[in-house]
Amino acid sequence: MKYLVNIGLETHVQLKTRTKMFCGCLLSTESEPNTNVCPVCLGLPGALPRANKEAVKFTVMSGLMLGCEIARHAEFARKNYFYPDMSKNYQISQSERPLCLGGSVEIHEGGVPSGAPKRVRINHIHLEEDAAKINHYARHSGVDYNRCGTPLMEIVGEPDLASPDEAMEYLQKLREILVYAGVSDCNLEDGNMRSDVNVSLRPEGSAKLGTKVEIKNMNTFKGIHAALEFEIARQTALLEAGGAVVQETRRWDGDLGETFSMRTKENAHDYRYFPEPDLLPVDLSEEQVEQWRKALPEAPEAKRARFQETLGLPAYDAGVLAAQKPLADFFEATLAAGAPAKLAANWIMGDLLRLLGAASLDVADLRTVTPASLAALLKLVDAKTVNGPTAKALLEEIFKKGGDPEAIVKERGLAQVADSGAIEALARQAIEANPKPAAEFRGGKAASLQFLVGQVMKLSKGKANPKLAAEALRKLLS
Amino acid sequence: MSDSSLDVAHVCALAHFDLSPEEMARFQRELGPIVAYVNKLSELDLTGIEPTQYGQPVANVLREDVVEPSLDRETVLRNAPDASETEFRMPRIVE
């Protein structure tokens, strides 16, 4: 029998606020243990939480980017459990009245670019606080409460994903959108984006979902993909052998490449949610939501489409330039400074990305080449004031030391020689100095022309327009 | 009067309360009438009535995202039953 797969992801995203969710303690992964803590995040009796407005805003902005309905009225709730990572014995979360409802992420069927468009539904997005970090030593465990109270946004997806590849595309798209919106760094190594993954199998033709298995706290995309592949194979083998899948939480062991059952107690999931009496509800007015909506950046998908439709860029170029917001911003600022679109796209995707890659530098940290200086350089290229190789050398120089391309060109007389009389004189000189290649070209060896063009370039100290040089040589040798 | 909707053993397990069988029986007996009394509310038709969760009609008491001073670590760890120089110390948890 053939089985169909249903995968659902609950993704926790750390919001990029300066302070914690319910107190003013600094958020930093670089501080000494237990130095960014106060009575609120330590859970001391009588300490009162106050919700961070920026975290509410970031969650609503994420909801708007993902097409959610924004709740006019939201409430916080207590999720009760006992574990040393949460000293007050409950986590403040949201249950009945989350901030965002519905929404979706657009992917492709099969998780491949050629697949048909597919909408993966989001059930809701809620806001909660992270727990403390527990470190394990030989004889004891230690608790560091610096992370406790970090704002986490939980995006609860519906089980609409049909394969590990679709799950990958969903996570990549989600990450792209959230980084774009500026609400999270979504840095996987730092655990900024962690997912609980659930997966179930059902026989083909059956609409009813199979029994699901949950794998908790996965923080790498690769790990999620591998865990899903393992789990699908395990469940398929189990069902084919006539067995049944047990609803349980399993743990992924990346080193062994297997999932293992975590024997959790039956009643461990009885979190006894109830309204948080220490926090008042959040009522969002139409004006407030509209104000935040206006501050939203253009979504990556919309940007890709615009680059293709209004700038006439090929799909590939639009995809590369829109994938990262800093790069898209740099590209658009270069256009705004007067560079032609296709030329700017070529130079940014080619030479600039190559230079950045070689220097291990992010475009956001680039200070030498600015959109204005790149635009100035491209205008010189477009007007044929400088030739290709000169422009390339100029970009490398500006990348290293900064500077104004126009000024450099003027100062060093780098403007290309486009005067056909001057080029013809150089061509004549090149032919006289190299009679053999000239004769070969006359005899039908086309490649010899390139050699002669090279000689003209050399005589002009790189400033001749190579196209005009070739024309002049052809004319003289015909 | 006892109430079957209250399972004292289950509640104790969730709350990590360690009670003797005698105590369990006593609480089951004594808490029953209290739960039954609260359950009287469900005799009313409350269709369309939102639960009263907040005493005052106030909302949006939010904080600006501004850093405030934290406590110094010595103070933080002073009340801990056990601590290293940097962390709260507890028996080793096996994952």
Image (tube, coloured by chain):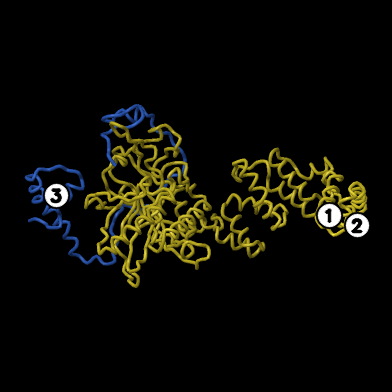
Chain colours: A yellow, B blue
Looking at the rendered structure, whether the residues under marks 3 and 1 are on a common chain is answered as no
Q: Give the residue type at disc 3.
A: Ala
Q: Give the residue type at disc 1.
A: Leu
Q: Provide residue A274's location: percent of width, then percent of height.
A: 28, 53
- The answer to whether the residues at label 2 and label 1 have Cβ atoms under 8 Å apart is yes
Q: What element does badge 1 sit on?
A: helix
Q: Quadrant of residue A209?
A: bottom left
Could you tell me which residue is drawn at 19 percent across and 62 percent down? B42
Can residue B59 be seen from the camera position used here? no
Could you tell me which residue is drawn at 74 percent across and 51 percent down? A378
Q: Which mark is residue A449?
A: 1
Question: On the rendered image, what quadrant is the N terminus of chain A found in?
Answer: bottom left
Q: What element does badge 3 sit on?
A: helix
Label 2 to label 1, Cα distance in Å? 10 Å
Crowding at mark 2 (Cα within 10 Å: few <14, some 14-19, many 20+) = some
Q: Provide residue A408's location: percent of width, then percent of height.
A: 79, 41
* Mark closer to the chain start, 2 or 1: 1
- Of B44 and B76, nearer the camera is B76
Q: Chain of mark 3?
A: B
Left or right of B26, for residue A14: right
Q: Provide residue A391's location: percent of width, then percent of height.
A: 75, 47
Label 3 to label 1, Cα distance in Å? 95 Å
Q: Which residue is mark 3?
A: B9
